[in-house]
Image: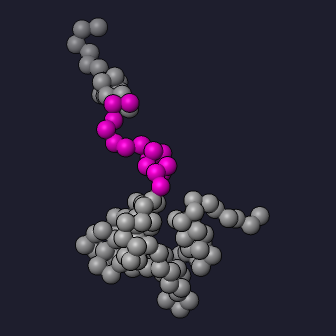
């Protein structure tokens, strides 16, 4: 019919298929192995709240490679970027140990 406009959603999907995206696929990035380019650069993750907090130190290269959240935090001008310390008040010690094991091995060891 004359005078009817194409709905915006239909026009967008017809002209910009997902295969044309220039963004890297998260699946492809995840398959790349982390490289230890700065072996002396460590960051600290703190598990738990202030009364029972436990500090863990990990190579920044590994934490940043496998966690976009930690990469953004440690490379920012915010507190975590300045101090190289990231607080995880809701995480317990065992959870952070699993995370560290995964950073270095890409294996999750879970007791059933």
Q: Which residue is farthest left?
A: 3
Q: Residue at x 45, y 44 (%)?
A: 28
Q: Residue at x 34, y 22 (%)?
A: 14
Q: Which residue is farthest top?
A: 1
- Quick check: 42 above or below 5? below
- Name the side, left or right, on which 105 lies relative to 24: right
- Quick check: 67 above or below 17? below
What's drawn in magenta, residue-wise?
Answer: 19-33
Residue 49, how many percent across, how many down?
Answer: 51, 84
- Quick check: 82 above or below 26? below
Residue 1, how many percent across, how many down?
Answer: 29, 8
Q: How is the image coloured?
A: one colour
Residue 7, how many percent across, how many down?
Answer: 31, 24
- Name the side, left or right, on which 42 lies relative to 16: right
Query: Disc count in the image?
Result: 0
Q: Residue at x 56, y 89 (%)?
A: 52
Q: Which of these two is toward me, 87 or 67?
A: 67
Q: Residue 23: in sight, yes or no?
A: yes
Is residue 2 located in the magenta-colored stretch of the structure?
Answer: no
Residue 65, how many percent across, how many down?
Answer: 42, 60
Q: Residue at x 57, y 59 (%)?
A: 106
* The quadrant where residue 22 appears: top left
Q: Residue 7: in sight, yes or no?
A: no
Q: Which of these two is toward me, 75 or 32?
A: 32
- Name the side, left or right, on which 66 lies relative to 100: left
Q: Which of these two is toward me, 6 or 95?
A: 95
Q: Which residue is farthest bottom?
A: 51
Is residue 29 located in the magenta-colored stretch of the structure?
Answer: yes
Quadrant of image for the C terminus: bottom right
* The quadrant where residue 37 appears: bottom left
């Amino acid at each position: 019919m004359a005078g009817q406009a194409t709905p915006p959603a239909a026009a967008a999907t017809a002209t910009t298929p997902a295969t044309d995206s220039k963004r890297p696929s998260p699946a492809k990035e995840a398959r790349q192995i982390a490289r230890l380019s700065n072996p002396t650069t460590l960051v600290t993750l703190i598990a738990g709240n202030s009364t029972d907090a436990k500090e863990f130190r990990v190579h920044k290269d590994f934490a940043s490679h496998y966690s976009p959240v930690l990469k953004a935090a440690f490379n920012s001008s915010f507190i975590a970027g300045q101090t190289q310390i990231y607080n995880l008040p809701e995480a317990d010690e065992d959870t952070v140990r699993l995370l560290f094991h995964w950073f270095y091995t890409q294996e999750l060891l879970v007791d059933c």
